[in-house]
Image (tube, rainbow, N blue to C red):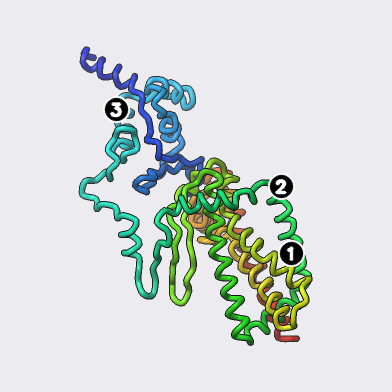
């Protein structure tokens, strides 16, 4: 090796790369038969997958450790050393994606179109029959203000009693389901009360979305957008948590996904109290009973483990997987065909995909049975 080449190799070995501060790395996730980590540049919004070995290296690029030190840790972990060409390849990949401090943060390809600004994107998505529109200019600041006002409810001293009340309410709903079904049937014959109940349920969906944002903010997440989305005749509110998959722990992500359904149920508590204890006329009492049933069904429906519902996000986190439904579907088709490729899946993946497939079928059967039982009851009363 010439003196020049040796000097270049030494300089490379002493280089101390650092990721840009707004680059996020996820935990290990199942993706098909592989284990991957997600990397996201929050400035550009782009993300991509890397394997465990690449993640091992990238996660140690903190500006403090040199490539020599990172390489020694890699050799100790995986039993092989990386040569200069491999280091150059990794650094080039990170540099062209703009992930390294001091690197150009633009898109890798100069011919790639310039990413649209948020207002441009909103305008482009807007249409008569379907589209979306932002409601606030700075969704993260808005969510931060909401968290300052309501964040105390996330403390155990408040949250635990509220959850106990929610469980008690749902027990009452289950025990008096026959009565509430009749109330719901009567509600649909009263346009005025039906409009009022529908308005309250829509407001509950708005609180559902904001709850996701507030809980994510509680755990250090960032809310990118709060707005309205329509697929006429349906108009719903949405709240996009920009770095949901990169929150500090799996349980923080589960709590964030669960927050919406919990908020739906908390919203029903005062109406449940009125229904149980207030001296109301018969029509209002029946309307509140119907609201309790429909609101509870709305909340529980969000926990069904199918995409894009919150229940799917929760189950994905419990399984430690990304694109769980697609991966499970691929694996189960291989098993059904007795394809030898199914044996290539690691045990953890086989267990997760089989559990998800069977669990989803079981939940759908329960829902179908509940719908049939409810319909039969309404037809026989």
Image disc number at residue 157: 2
Image disc number at residue 169: 1
Few, some or many residues within 10 Å of mark 3 (<14, 14–19, 20+)? few
- Which image quarter holds the N terminus? top left
* Callouts 2 and 1 close, C-beta under 8 Å: no
Label 3 SS: helix
Question: Vertically, is 119 above or below 343?
Answer: below
- Residue 300: image x %, image y %? 63, 64
Q: Nearer the viewer, residue 330 or 7?
A: 7
Q: Residue at x 72, y 68 (%)?
A: 272
Few, some or many residues within 10 Å of mark 2 (<14, 14–19, 20+)? few
Which residue, given by chain and number where applicable, does mark 3 sit on? 85
Q: Nearer the viewer, residue 71 or 239?
A: 239
The answer to whether any part of residue 162 appears in the image is yes
CA gap, disc 3 to disc 1?
Answer: 64 Å
Q: Which residue is drawn at 46% across and 23% down?
A: 73
Q: Identify the mark nearer the N-term, 2 or 1.
A: 2
Question: Vertically, is 117 above or below 371?
Answer: above
Question: Vertically, is 54 above or below 301?
Answer: above
- Residue 369: image x %, image y %? 68, 72
């Amino acid at each position: 090796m010439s003196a020049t080449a040796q000097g270049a190799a030494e300089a490379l070995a002493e280089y101390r790369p650092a990721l840009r501060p707004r680059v996020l790395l996820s935990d290990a996730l199942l993706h098909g038969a592989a284990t991957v980590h997600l990397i996201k540049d929050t400035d550009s919004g782009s993300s991509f997958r890397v394997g465990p070995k690449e993640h091992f290296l990238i996660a140690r690029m903190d500006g403090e450790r040199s490539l020599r030190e990172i390489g020694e840790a890699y050799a100790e972990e995986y039993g092989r050393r990386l040569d200069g060409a491999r280091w150059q390849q990794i650094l080039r990949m990170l540099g062209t994606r703009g992930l390294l401090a001091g690197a150009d943060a633009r898109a890798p390809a100069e011919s790639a179109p310039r990413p649209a600004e948020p207002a441009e994107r909103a305008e482009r998505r807007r249409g008569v029959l379907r589209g979306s529109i932002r409601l606030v200019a700075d969704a993260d600041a808005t969510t931060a203000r909401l968290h300052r006002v309501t964040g105390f409810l996330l403390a155990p001293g408040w949250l635990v009693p509220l959850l106990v009340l929610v469980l008690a309410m749902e027990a009452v709903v289950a025990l008096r389901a026959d009565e509430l079904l009749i109330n719901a049937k009567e509600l649909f014959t009263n346009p005025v009360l039906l409009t009022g109940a529908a308005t309250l349920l829509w407001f509950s969906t708005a609180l559902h979305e904001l709850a996701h944002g507030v809980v994510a903010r509680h755990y250090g997440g960032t809310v990118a957008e709060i707005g309205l989305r329509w697929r006429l005749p349906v108009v719903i509110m949405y709240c996009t948590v920009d770095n949901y998959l990169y929150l500090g722990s799996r349980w923080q992500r589960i709590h964030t996904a669960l927050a919406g359904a919990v908020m739906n149920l908390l919203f029903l508590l005062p109406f449940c109290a009125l229904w149980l204890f207030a001296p109301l006329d018969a029509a209002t009492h029946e309307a509140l009973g119907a609201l309790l049933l429909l609101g509870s069904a709305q909340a529980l429906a969000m926990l069904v483990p199918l995409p894009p519902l919150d229940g799917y996000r929760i189950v994905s986190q419990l399984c430690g997987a990304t694109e769980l439904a697609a991966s499970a579907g691929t694996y189960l088709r291989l098993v059904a065909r007795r394809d030898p490729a199914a044996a290539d899946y690691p045990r953890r993946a086989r267990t997760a995909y089989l559990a998800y497939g069977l669990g989803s079928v079981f939940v759908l059967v329960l829902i179908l049975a509940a719908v049939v039982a409810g319909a039969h009851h309404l037809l026989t009363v």
